[in-house]
Image: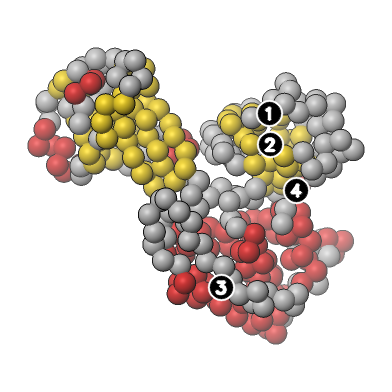
Amino acid sequence: MTPDQMISRVRRLSNMPAAQGRISDNGVMEILNDGKDKLCQRLIEADEGFFETETAETITFVANTETYDLPAILKDAKLTTVELFDTSGNFLRMLEKVSVQRKEITQGISAPARDVVQYYLSGRKIGFKPKPTTAQTDAVKIRGLQHPIDFYWGTTGTPGSTTSFVITGGTTLGGSASTETDYYKNAYVRFLSGTNALGVQRKITAYNANTKTVTLDAVIVIADCTAQTFCIFSPIPDQYHNVLISYAVMQIASTQENDSLFQTHKSLWEDALRVADETIESRSYDGPNRVQLPADLYDDV
């Protein structure tokens, strides 16, 4: 489901049409994304590779510099590999991860970039041992499993090019766009309105948090994609969308003091978490093993 479809279903199930004005679409979207965070945490605890959204970023060595900021898109990711390359782009070796405490043993040891053998993590920084004494562009490639982003629903301004557009008007739909650079990278955007734009889908290759500019992997027609509604998909599998809807209805019912509605959707939410706990098994990164919720768990209640 797209975010606007999820919001409509939450409103129908909780008997709270938008005309009543008791909660905005933005407010419903915030509740859905809060449920998304809770659900993701449970799924990742069961299988850290559940979402399989792997991304790769590079780090350029600066001479005599040991620590570097992790790329923004990897700050909450589960790192899978850290690889070293030579000046010609040839793979040299996988780097061994060591603890911050162990890296102190080699404090003060330095060597040319090609002789780096270890890395360590400290907060949102990554350090390399021996400390590289030579500069090198794209010396290290870091791969990680990207944390699932929020669902988003907004409107476009006039696209700045055939491969980008600026997010506007988001506060009245899905809330304010992310303030983190590249937060939406690797996600998919779909246009939800427009005679020719409706249904057009593209992959996001970059996101400028300062200008709210989304860069796409393929061209769009500027005239068709101006002032249109769009959504950005979270990698939550479709079979879990109803789980999130139940979470939102449960939260809204609690504010309405509708105990019957609250208990119904609380039970559905807890059942889904239990199914996730009991059926997802940890796996390696070479194949999917997602849990499939029972077909009758979410009838149209």
| Inter-mark Cα distance, 2 to 1 | 7 Å
Q: What kind of element bears circle 3?
A: helix
Residues at badges 2 and 1 in contact (C-beta under 8 Å)? yes
Rendered residue at 58%/56% (across/down)? 236
Circle 1 residues within 10 Å: few <14, some 14–19, many ≥20: few
Rendered residue at 76%/54% (across/down)? 4
Indicate which disc, 1 or 4, sits on the residue closer to the N terminus. 4
- Looking at this rendering, what residue extends furthest in the left direction? 105
- Comparing 183 with 275, the one in front is 275
- Within the image, what quadrant is residue 154 found in? top right
- Residue topped by disc 3: 272
- Residue topped by disc 1: 218
Q: What kind of element bears circle 1?
A: loop
Tell me the amino acid under the disc marked 3. Ala
- Residue topped by disc 2: 202
Q: Nearer the viewer, mark 2 or mark 3?
A: 2
Tell me the amino acid under the disc marked 1. Ala
Q: What kind of element bears circle 2?
A: strand
Residue 172, image x and y in percent?
Answer: 76, 47
| Inter-mark Cα distance, 1 to 4 | 25 Å
| Inter-mark Cα distance, 4 to 3 | 28 Å
